[in-house]
Image (spheres, rainbow, N blue to C red):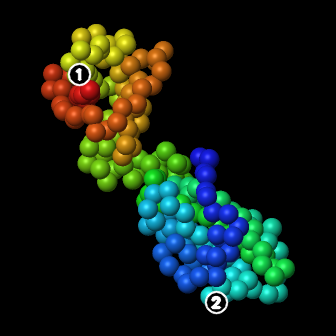
Amino acid sequence: MAHLTVDLNDAELLARMKNFEDHLVERKTVRDDKDWKKTAVAFANSVPVGLPAVLFIGVRNNGEIENPQPNMDEVQKKFNTQMQRVYPRIAYVPKIVAENGRQALAVIVPGSESRPHFAGLSYVRRGSETFEASEEQFAELVAQRNSKAALILQSKGKNVTVITHPLFGQMPEIGVMGGRWPDTTVIVNCDQFYVTLLASPTDVPESFPLGRVEVNRDNLRSRLQLEIHG
């Protein structure tokens, strides 16, 4: 999980806890544990990217911290366990807030650049068995909604024709002769943002924004052709 910086101090968190619920604040009691994950996912998917929303756990609808006090360590562990079932993973910061000798858990969830997130695992078939999808496989499933990414993924692991079209005055990519990549080039991976290519087994994979990539067909070699611009 990437490092996450938030700007909500204890006083700001307590103020949010006491105010009315809105699109940036939700209060749940410890017994409402079935709604914790749904709320966190909804925040990550709906809040403007980078803007912090807060899920308060152990707080009643009127903004008061519930009593008797639960074990906050156990509450936080339970929440962390639930978040392991979210794909892709959500960045969040848990903080303990205190008022009148009572404690509650404030979970700060910013709007996510990696949306959409899903409150459950995805599964794939491998041979005759079913497995939980890995992060990479999940990204591929999402990318298949993009017609360009889906077409590129059909040739994953296969040789492709790659031609670069540098901007005027730019030099061609290192190791690329005349803008054409070696015939050994294969597609390593592709998601909704980037395509990753490997020119040869001894090279380092290179990634390119999908917006710079034009998909074509190399009819001479009967395979996919990618043209990279800029």
| The quarter of the displayed image where residue 218 is located | top left
Q: Residue at x 48, y 21 (%)?
A: 204
Image coordinates of residue 5 in percent, x first then y, are 61, 52
Residue 62, which numbered label? 2
The local secondary structure at tag 2 comes to loop
Instruction: Determine whether, in the image, residue 225 is placed left or right of residue 128.
Output: left
Instruction: Determine whether, in the image, residue 6 is placed left or right of residue 202.
Output: right
Disc 1 packing (10 Å; few <14; some 14–19; many ≥20): few
Q: Please say if 165 is above or below 72.
A: above
Tell me if I can see residue 6 in this picture.
Answer: yes
Give the residue at mark 1: 167
Q: Amino acid under label 2? A: Asn
Q: CA distance from mark 1 to mark 2?
A: 60 Å
Q: Amino acid under label 1? A: Leu
Where, quadrant-wise, is the C terminus in this rendering?
top left
Q: Residue at x 62, y 88 (%)?
A: 61
Q: Residue at x 26, y 34 (%)?
A: 213
Q: Residue furthest front?
A: 11
Instruction: Determine whether, in the image, residue 24 is placed left or right of residue 226.
Output: right
